[in-house]
Image (tube, rainbow, N blue to C red):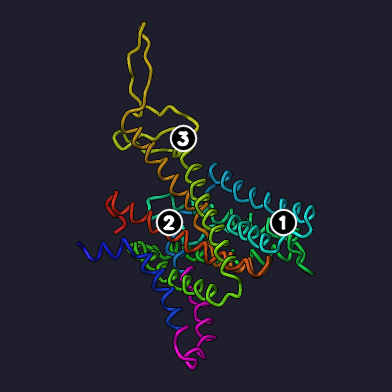
Amino acid sequence: MDLKQTIKDWMLPIAMLTGASLYLIYDALPEPVHRAGPFLNDLVAVLQPLLIFAMLFLTFCRIEPRELKPHRWHWWLLLIQGGLFTLLGLGTVLLVKLFPGWGSEWKVLVESAMLCLICPTATAAAVVTRKLGGDVPGITTYIVLINILAAVLVPLIVPLIQPMAGLTFWEAFNMILAKVLPLLMLPCFCAWLVRYLMPGVHRKLLKWQDLPFNLWVVALVLAIAVTTKAIVTSEMSWTLILAMSAVSLLCCIFQFRAGRYVGSCYKPRRPVLKSSGQRGRGPCHPRHESGGTTSEAKGWGERSERPRPSALKAEERGREVRKVTAGQSLGQKNTVFAIWLGYTFMTPETAIVGGLYSIWHNCFNSWQLYRHNHRTPDTSE
C-alpha cells in the first residue's frame, strides 16, 4: 500500500485526532506547564487568522474577478439558511410567551440549532470544494453573500429571544461585518493586486496547488484543539452536551443534503462539450446549440432532437459540480465565527455547538475526500 496515498486519504482524521490529543496531553501535564496557557491562547488567536488569510489569498489567486457572480442556486441556499433561522427565532418567541416556564435547556438547544443554520460558510470551504472538483468561484461568491445576510438577520432576530442591552441593530451589524469582512476582502484585494501587478509572482503562486489544503489541515488541528478545550472545561452537564451534539449532527446532515439537492437541480450555465467544442445554452434551455444534439427519425417524416452522449456527459458533470459546490456552501461552516456569535449575542453555553459542528462537518469532508480520491484520479497535483 502506498504510504503517501494512505496519509492523504486519512489526512483530516489524523488532523482531528492530533488536535484533540494535543490538548488532552497538555491538560494532563503538571501544573507549572499550564502557566504557558495564556501565551498559547494568544498564539492560536494569531495563527488562525493568518492561516485563513493565506488560504484565501492562494484561493483568490486562482479566481478572476469576473467569475464572482451570483447564481440562482445561491438565492435558494440563502432562503434556506435565513428562512429557517428566522422561523426558529420567531417560534421560540411564541413558545416563551405561551409557556413562560419553558425550560432554559430547551432554549439553549433551539439557539444551538439557530447558530448552526445561520453560521456563514467556512472560508476553508473553497479549498475543500476545489479538492472535490467543485466550483470555487461559485462557493466564494456565496461566502460573501451569506456573511452579509448573517450580519443583517442576527441583529434583527436574536434580540427577540436574547435581549442585547445597550446594543442597537447598527452596532451589532457593524460588529459582525467587522469580524468577517476584513478576513474576506483583504486576501481578495491582495490576490488581485498580485494577479495584475506582479504576473510573474502570480504564476509561481499557482504552482503551489496543494498548499491551501495543507494550511487548512494545520488550521483544523488548532480548531479541534480549541474545541476539545471548550468541551473539557465546560461546566454544562454531559446530558446537555450530548443533546447539543445531536442537534449539531442533525443540522449538519440536513444542510449537506439540502445543499446537494438544490445543486442537483441546476445544470451548468454553459457546459463545455468536449467532442464538439460547443457550449450549451444554460440551465433554462434543455436544448443545446449545434454540435450538442443529434437528430432522430420519427414517424411521418418528423425528426426530433436528443442530446449527444458528449452533451449528456457534460450536463451530468455540471450537475455533479453544482451538487458538490452547493453542498459545501450550505454544510461546511465557519465554526470559529459560530463560537464568537454564541458568546457575543446568544446564551454563552451555545458557543460550544460551533466546535461540535466542526467535528461533524470535518468527518463528512473526510469521507467525501476519501471517496473522491478513490473514484477519480487526483488531478490537483
Magenta stretch holds residue 46: yes
Residue 152 rendering spot, x and y as whole percentages: 68, 56
| Distance between mark 3 and mark 1 Cα atoms | 37 Å
Can you say whether 361 is above or below 36 in the image? Answer: above
Residue type at mark 1?
Ile
x and y, in percent, of residue 108 in the image: 65, 63
Looking at the image, residue 348 sits to the left or right of residue 247; the answer is right
Q: Identify the residue shown where x is 36% and y is 34%.
A: 278
Q: Is residue 76 above or below residue 3?
A: above
- Whether residue 67 is visible here, answered yes or no, is no
| Position of residue 317 in the picture relative to residue 1 (left or right) | right
Provide the residue designation for mark 2: 364
Would you name the residue on which mark 3 appears? 282
Mark 3: give few (<14), some (14-19) or many (20+) Cα within 10 Å. some
Q: Which residues are magenta?
A: 27-52
**Residue at position x 50%, y 88% in the image:** 34
Which circle marks residue 157 in the picture? Answer: 1
Q: CA distance from mark 1 to mark 2?
A: 30 Å
Q: Secondary structure at mark 2?
A: helix
